[in-house]
Amino acid sequence: MLHYKKAGIASALLPLLAACSGGSSVDDIPEIIDPPVVAECSADQTQTDNRDDGSVWVQACSADGTWGDWEQVSEPWDCQPDSTEAETHDDGSQWLRSCSAEGQWGEWQMTAPAWECEPGTSEEEIRSDGSSWSRMCSDEGAWEEWVMLIPSSTREVTVTFTHPGNINLGGASFAGASTGPQVGPDMSTFLDKDAYILKINGAKAEVDPFSIDEDLPVTLTTGDVIHVESAQKQTYNLSAMSATYVVEGEAELNETAVELNVDLVNGGFTWVTVDNHEQVEKVSVSEQELQLAEDDAYWYTFIPVDNEYTTEIVTTDNIFTITDIKAEGESQHYPVPKTDDDLDDEQWWWIQNDLLTSGMYQRVWDQVVAGNRAFAALHKDKWVVTWGSLERGGDSSAVADQLVDVKSLHVTTQAFAALKEDGSVVTWGDVTQGADTTGLDAELYDIVQIVSTSKAFAALRADGKVFAWGDIEKGGDISAVAEQLVDVDSIHSGENAFAAIRKDGTVVTWGFPTHGGDSSAVQDQLTDVVQIFGNASTFTARTKDNRFVAWGVYPDLSSVEDKLEDVVRLRYNQESFMGILDTGELITWGRSDVGGDPGEDAAELYDIVEMAHSRWAFVARREDGQIFAWGSVNYGSVTDHVEHLFFDIKRVFGTPYALMAVQEDNSLITWGGATRCGALPDGALSLADVRDVGHSLHACVAIHSDGSTTSWGDSKYGGNQSGVQHLLDGNQVVRIYGSDQGVAAMLSDGQIVTWGSGTGGGNSDVVAHIIRPALTDEFGP
């Protein structure tokens, strides 16, 4: 029997079937019904699939009895349950973590600690007894037992010195400066090869000063640290700055090495180099003339690191000044413009640098000096002009024809001396105070140095002989010591006496006996002397091995004797001295009531970075900005009325009767003798925008950043500039010079304007056409 699922097919076959059956009608055939559809699942039925990654999936049955899509109902495992994982760290430690039944990692747990050391390595140590030991690290990272390599050892070794012929500056730059010379100057220029000392573990060794050109036998123990340093401070006079070459090495004594090589290198110094060209005639740093490099390419010196210094560059037509410079880094290099160079170009960075005080002015006068009532000026073409009190040096007409080819000017209170290029000397002024060289004219040739006391001159000739003239009591007569004044290397002076250092380091003195002219009480101590400092009453000398010796009115050094060898900077007023040690501590000696005793401030005088003085008082600035002043009340020891202004102080300095401080914003604060610069005009406590201060004995003049000036103090002696204000207006003042009673202001174009006492140098009308020609043409003398 045939079955048909679809009615449509059955209907199509009915006629054929009817014909075959003998004619039965279609109506006689029964209707065919489709079979029912069977459901895949029942409503609300679900099924679950747990897969190999730990995730769980669910499938639900739909309303029509078919299965829906699989849906994930839980995440896969982080890890295989009950599994573990291990790792080893760089320090040798081992760590393990386990997977939970839920497939989550647990915390790492240390199963083995870190090594004590890296396997296969070793270390050595030198113990306090000098013995040498070593130990190895095992394969398990644990230290094995110490094994002695060398027993305790003390023996003689040879210290051998080497030092480079040149110091490489490394092309260092400073504050935008162009690259400096690649090779510095020959260090041997600055090395005293026969004056070095040895320190072992910080203590001075019991060996005489030695030469670095020879081997030094010395007894050392393994582990000793040695320092070798110059016994003579290099290279500046202590009154400016000083420092010491220091080298160090470790004595490594063992069975084979018994020689210690020490390199003497440029440590703690900044090389200062200045470009040279055909227009540069002279370069000075902190008032000391520099040397030219062998190839004449640059001028050079070095400054102890962190010291401040000034630079002056003299060219054919201009003078460049740079102040407020701090020695930093390996080198500081200054390019110098030529006359036809564009001075606004960025390469002259030091002219525009806001951190420095720098400038340029026209070169007309190379030197201006003053006695108590007269001035003398040396023109760049080497002739001289004078003005002021006629009998005290203001009138040089009697020797005018001789005042040509002059090299330098020198002065006592009332007389002048000119040293000429040929080594001869010309004098004028008060004949009792240095103007009369009668009997010496034939001897005053090849002169290389002239110094003065208040009323006498002394001159050193190239052959080492010394000559003196002027007031006998002040050193004008050398007859008592003439035979000793041979082979002299240099002459030094105080206010009342002279001292000469001979080439063998001994000293000869003459002048007012009680004020330094008689050194017989300490003569046996004056050996190997390298420096002498003199004030109005006392001399202090320093030797190669840093001993200090004093003689005169206040020669007692007992309170500071154990510290003097560490002095790196020194200042003095009329009758006292003060010095900064290499630790920053400040010490004093001399007359106690004018600065020799700081009293209750003594314990506070540490970390001192700057010091200054008036005639009978001192001031010191500490690194944290604290200011301390002591000495005579009338000369600056009392600061009560200005102490509230002692903040942001960047500089301190002194004038004869007052002390001063400058704040970071260039505000000036003064205290001391009220009528002689200690009190500012109109009762002001500070004066704004001050770049520099000059003075006569009784008055002061502040130069502002725009070149204008403010005067105060005794109006008769320079404290009142109103009479010349019309000459100053519109001009820039660059320097102030002072006699006792008058002031001279140098303008940027080289002209000179004066004011103060007419007979004290304040009136220069008689030479106005020479010292200020342009202003004279405009305003008259």
Image (cartoon, grey):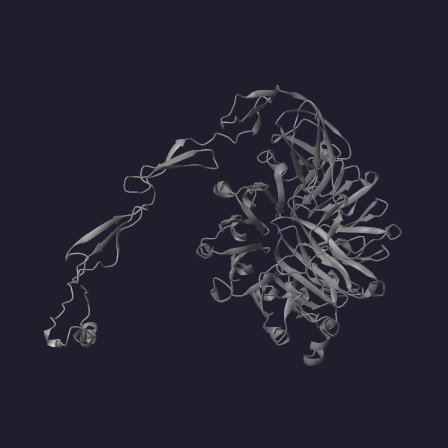
Q: State the image quarter where residue 510 is shown.
A: top right
Residue displayed at 58% across by 51% down: 612
* Number of numbered discs overlaid on the protein picture: 0
Q: Is residue 756 visible?
A: no
Classify 286 as above or below 30. Answer: above
Classify 246 as above or below 454. Answer: above
Out of 632 and 758, give the one closest to the viewer: 632
Out of 244 and 255, give the one closest to the viewer: 255
Q: State the image quarter where residue 217 is shown.
A: top right
Out of 531 and 104, give the one closest to the viewer: 104
Residue displayed at 55% across by 55% down: 651
Quadrant showing the N terminus: bottom left
Residue displayed at 12% across by 72% down: 29
Extreme residue toward the right, this view: 442
Estimate the x, y position of residue 770 in percent, counting from the top left: 75, 72
Q: Is residue 319 visible?
A: yes
Estimate the x, y position of residue 13 in percent, counting from the top left: 20, 74
Extreme residue toward the bottom, this view: 778
Q: Is residue 142 left or right of residue 329?
A: left
Estimate the x, y position of residue 727 in percent, counting from the top left: 64, 75
Quadrant showing the C terminus: bottom right
Classify 159 as above or below 385. Answer: above
Estimate the x, y position of residue 568 in percent, counting from the top left: 63, 43
